[in-house]
Image: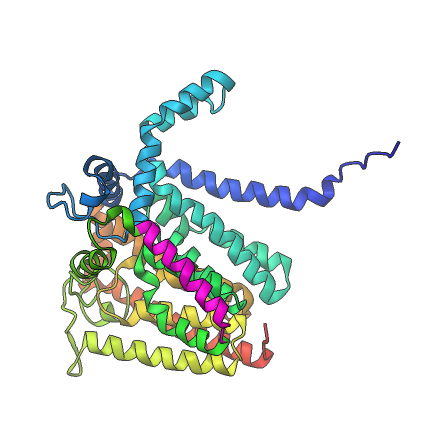
C-alpha cells in the first residue's frame, strides 16, 4: 500500500500568508464601508439609482425625469452592477435562513448586514477590484524585476495605501474597477491577446469612460503589435456581445439610437458640465487659477486653458509614442506610457476631478518599485493625491480642513499642484533614463 505524502506546510506557507494579507486588506475596507455615508453623497446617489432600477424598470431607468438627487449618468454596465447590489440587499433574509440551518454566516454579520449591507454592496465592486489590482501589480513588478520581495512590497503598498483604501472603502468609488479592466486590457494586448484585450477595454469604458484618454495609445500599440485577423474578429465579436448584453435591458426601440441618445444627452454633458479650469484636481490650472472657480477658457499668455490642455495632451502622446517605440514596446515602456498620459492628462486637461489621477496610480506603483530613481518622487505624488482626495471629500463637512487649503489665496493647493507637476516630470525623467541604460526588453 503506497504511503501518503506528508503535508509540507513550508511549501504552502507563502501562499497562506499572501492570502491572509489580501483578506486583511479586504476586511479593512469592509469595516470602513459603514462610515462616512453622510459625507459621501455619491453612495446615497448610487443607492437611489439602484432602487429606482427595480421600481421603474430598466427601460424607463435612463429616461425618467424626476430624480431625487440626479439622473443616472454612468454607462449601462455600472447601472446593472448597482442594481444587482440592491437586489442582493433586498434578499438579505436568505442570510438568516442560511444561519438557521448551518449557523453560517454568524449572527453578528447578519445584524451588521441588515443595517449596512446596501452600503457595503455598493462599495464592494471597488473593494474587490483593489484585491485584483494588488495581484496584478505584484505580477507586473515580479515580471519586470524578477525580484519577489519587490513584487510583494509593491502589492502591499497598493493594498494598504490610504489612497486606494479611501476611494473604495470610504468614498465608495469604482475607479479601481475601471483601472483593473483598463490595465488588464493593455497587459493582454502586450501579450498579443487582442481577442481578450478589446473586451477588457470595453468593460473598463462601459463602467466609466475614464480610460478614454488612452485610446490613442491603445491604437498605437495595436498598430505596432499587428494582431491576426482572427483575433481582431473574435475581439470585436466578444465586445459586441458584451455591448448588446449590457445595453439591451435599457432599450425600448433601437439599441444604437438609444446609445446615441444616452451618450449625447446624459453621459457626455455631465463630463463637462462644470466648465472649470479645474473642478477639484490639484493640477497645472490650480497653480495659476482658483480651484472650482475659474473658467476652462482662462488664458495663459493669451492661450485659453482648454486649448493649452488639449495641445499638451497631444504633445504628451507624441513623445510617449516615440519613447515606447524606442524601447521596442517593452512592458516597462507601456507602464511608463500609461503613467505619462494618465497623470499628464490629469495635470493639463481642464474639467478634471480629484479622482482622475487614478488611471495612472497602479502604473505609478509598478514604476516606483521597478525603477529605483522614481521611488522618492512617487511617494511625494502619493501624498499629494491623497491630500487632494481628502480635501475634496471633507471640504464641505469639515470647515477647518477647507480653511487650511484655501488660506492665503489657496497657497496650500498651489504648492501641492506644483509638487504634482514637478514629480510627474521627474519620475518620467528618472524612469526613462533607467530603462535606456538598462536597455529593457521586458
Residue 225 at x, y percent in the picture:
50, 75
**Foreground residue, 148 or 3?**
3
Please provide the residue range marked out in magenta.
Answer: 226-246
Task: Assess whether residue 84 is covered by the magenta stretch.
Answer: no
| 86 over 171 or under it: above or below | above
Image quadrant where residue 121 sits: top left
**Foreground residue, 285 or 117?**
117
**Foreground residue, 62 or 440?**
62
Considering every residue shown, the one lying at the far front of the view is 253
Image quadrant where residue 241 sits: bottom left
Residue 219 at x, y percent in the picture:
40, 74
As drawn, is 341 to the left or to the right of 248?
Answer: right
Task: Assess whether residue 233 is covered by the magenta stretch.
Answer: yes
Image quadrant where residue 349 sits: bottom left
Q: Residue at x 59, y 80 (%)?
A: 439
Main secondary structure of the magenta stretch = helix
As drawn, is 150 to the left or to the right of 59?
Answer: right
| 289 over 148 or under it: above or below | below
Residue 258 at x, y percent in the picture:
21, 56
Residue 68 at x, y percent in the picture:
14, 41
| Quadrant location, the N terminus | top right
Question: Is there any visible trace of residue 397 in the rendered image?
Answer: no
Amino acid at each position: 500500500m503506497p504511503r501518503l505524502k506528508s503535508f509540507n506546510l513550508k511549501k504552502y506557507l507563502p501562499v497562506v500568508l499572501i492570502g491572509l494579507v489580501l483578506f486583511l486588506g479586504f476586511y479593512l475596507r469592509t469595516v470602513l464601508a459603514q462610515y462616512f455615508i453622510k459625507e459621501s453623497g455619491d453612495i446615497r446617489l448610487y443607492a437611489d439609482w439602484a432602487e429606482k432600477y427595480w421600481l421603474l424598470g430598466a427601460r424607463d431607468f435612463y429616461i425618467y425625469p424626476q430624480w431625487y438627487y440626479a439622473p443616472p449618468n454612468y454607462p449601462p454596465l455600472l447601472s446593472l452592477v448597482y442594481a444587482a447590489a440592491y437586489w442582493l440587499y433586498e434578499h438579505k433574509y436568505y442570510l438568516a435562513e442560511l444561519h438557521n440551518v448551518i449557523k453560517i454566516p454568524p449572527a453578528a454579520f447578519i445584524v451588521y448586514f441588515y443595517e449596512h449591507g446596501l452600503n457595503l454592496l455598493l462599495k464592494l465592486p471597488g473593494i474587490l477590484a483593489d484585491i485584483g489590482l494588488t495581484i496584478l501589480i505584484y505580477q507586473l513588478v515580479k515580471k519586470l524585476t524578477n525580484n519577489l520581495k519587490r513584487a510583494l512590497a509593491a502589492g502591499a503598498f497598493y493594498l494598504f495605501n490610504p489612497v486606494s483604501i479611501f476611494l473604495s472603502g470610504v468614498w465608495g468609488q469604482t475607479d479601481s474597477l475601471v483601472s483593473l479592466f483598463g490595465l488588464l486590457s493593455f497587459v493582454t494586448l502586450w501579450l498579443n491577446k487582442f481577442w481578450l484585450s478589446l473586451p477588457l477595454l470595453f468593460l473598463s469604458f462601459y463602467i466609466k469612460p475614464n480610460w478614454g484618454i488612452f485610446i490613442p495609445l491603445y491604437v498605437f500599440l495595436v498598430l505596432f503589435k499587428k494582431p491576426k485577423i482572427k483575433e481582431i474578429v473574435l475581439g470585436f465579436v466578444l465586445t459586441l456581445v458584451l455591448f448588446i448584453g449590457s445595453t439591451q435591458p435599457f432599450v425600448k426601440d433601437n439599441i444604437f439610437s438609444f446609445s446615441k441618445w444616452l451618450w449625447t444627452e446624459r453621459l457626455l454633458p455631465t463630463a463637462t458640465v462644470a466648465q472649470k479650469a479645474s473642478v477639484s484636481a490639484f493640477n497645472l490650472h490650480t497653480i495659476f487659477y482658483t480651484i472650482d472657480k475659474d473658467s476652462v477658457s482662462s488664458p495663459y499668455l493669451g492661450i485659453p486653458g482648454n486649448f493649452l490642455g488639449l495641445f499638451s495632451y497631444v504633445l504628451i502622446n507624441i513623445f510617449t509614442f516615440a519613447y515606447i517605440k524606442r524601447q521596442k514596446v517593452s512592458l516597462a515602456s507601456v507602464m511608463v506610457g500609461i503613467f505619462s498620459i494618465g497623470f499628464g492628462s490629469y495635470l493639463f486637461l481642464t474639467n478634471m476631478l480629484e479622482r482622475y489621477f487614478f488611471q495612472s496610480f497602479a502604473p505609478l506603483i509598478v514604476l516606483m518599485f521597478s525603477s529605483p530613481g522614481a521611488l522618492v518622487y512617487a511617494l511625494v505624488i502619493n501624498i499629494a493625491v491623497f491630500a487632494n482626495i481628502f480635501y475634496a471629500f471633507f471640504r464641505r463637512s469639515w470647515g477647518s480642513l477647507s480653511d487650511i487649503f484655501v488660506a492665503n489665496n489657496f497657497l496650500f493647493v498651489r504648492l501641492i499642484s506644483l509638487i504634482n507637476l514637478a514629480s510627474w516630470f521627474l519620475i518620467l525623467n528618472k524612469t526613462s533614463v533607467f530603462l535606456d541604460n538598462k536597455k529593457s526588453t521586458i
